[in-house]
Amino acid sequence: MVLKAKIGLLFHGPEVVDEGEAEHALDAVRKAGFEFEAALGGITGKTAIIDAGLQHVIDISRDKKPSEVALEFIESGIKFIILVNHAKSIDSALALGEGILRNLLKMTSSDFSFVQAEYCCSVHGGSGVRDGGRDGGGVFIIWRLRDAHKYERLKACFGFDEMEAPSVINRCERDADGFLRREICGVLPGEKILVNGTVIGNVSEDNKSGKITLVVKDGRIVDVEGGMLISHNLLKLPFVDIETAIVKTGQHIRRTKPRRVGVESIKLADDRKKACIFHTVEKLFPRISKGDVAIVITVGDDTTSIAGDILKRFEDIRLIGITDGDADGLIEGINTGSIEEYGNFLPRNSIVIRLKPERDDVIAEHIKSEIFKDGDEIPIDDVDDAFEKIKRRIFCVASDDIVGVISSESPGEADKMFEECPMKFEECTMNGEERDER
């Protein structure tokens, strides 16, 4: 029997998908007899959902924070929400659930249940912890329970232990000197610290507390207690509202490996193809899902590697990556940051250009100004022709700064194409258009 009341399944991160636990959660809700609506919160789990072939079951189109997806559930009449997650530790799991619920309570006064299905561990006997798994062996963390009947049905079908969640407290406070301090829990020594997708520092190797505190003055991060800042990376971060900023810690954006790499086909419209430029990957998925992006230009080492890993899963979208060797290694496989490492992340018919240190943002400004006319996209007709023209113009504008080029098809051929473009950029253009070759 299928019960009419819907359950909202809020999935977070790639790990719960890669480990097969997302399917366990979906099956458990079906077994309990409930209809459900399933959606991803955040963006880091999208490639995992495509790899698992679950994109037609779990909605990956929303491009919203987990709390915002939960709010959409509530506004559509869904009053029982399950956060489905696989954290690196129970402390990290609790920090995630608390943060999502805290933000959600700021946005709505509605009555709802919020339970976390956490696959990282199971608590039994009040203290023991064992690993989770796709066949159960997780824990239900009860953050807010308003419907015990639904909960008992679900708990029986998940086969989980349970634990009461701690109280939700404010972890962002302003001190007497006007500094805003935000505490982040569940961190591990040596992890990277990301704020709104930018690596701003590292957790100290001797940090045994499991916590760091970000210190902000006038919208700028000035210190991190329990960690070390990377000063030049802070320059990439504009004014930040630390109370609402997305803060994460970890070594890579995906700790687990997919069982297979999925491919999603997007049919390009014949009459409205475009080339787009991206400095971050946050807006890449929603932009390419419109079906009109044929060429992607990325700026930055991490942006290029992550975008390449994403675009490999989509047919017929080409990449031109602009890098300068300062990768933070957010994706597994980028270790030294050498240009050769990017070969594993290139879609078909794509290239990565390596510039001299600290030149990618400078060259990107010229590209955006001269090719994209200070916008983020331009219309194109023939994809092959447009790709060659854009590539050639980038070679020309960056010719004095290019130290290497790698191609998904033939690295040697790509280097040759650069060598055959001795012109300066101004010689490649005339009235904003490419000069006829003659």
Image (cartoon, rainbow, N blue to C red):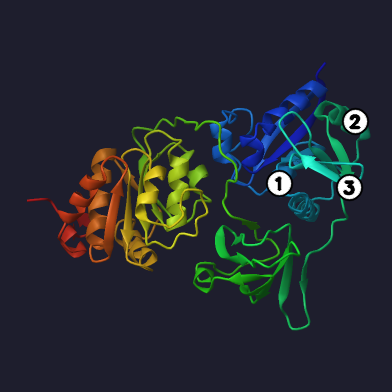
Q: Which mark is residue 87?
A: 1
Kindly identify which residue carries mark 2.
Answer: 152
Name the quadrant containing residue 346: top left
Q: Position of residue 390 (x, y in %)?
A: 27, 50
Kindly identify which residue carries mark 3.
Answer: 127
| Mark toward the start of the polypeptide (3 vs 1) | 1
Q: Position of residue 96 (x, y in %)?
A: 74, 51
Name the quadrant containing residue 369: bottom left
- Tell me how far mark 3 sits from mark 1, CA to CA: 18 Å
* Residue 382 seen in render: no
- Tell me how far mark 1 sits from mark 2, CA to CA: 24 Å
| Mark toward the start of the polypeptide (1 vs 2) | 1
Q: Where is residue 106 in the image (x, y as percent from the top left)?
A: 79, 56
Left-right relation of 61 to 186 = left
Quarter occupied by the N terminus: top right
Question: Callout 3: 10 Å neighbours few (<14), some, many (20+)?
Answer: few
Left-right relation of 272 to 101 = left
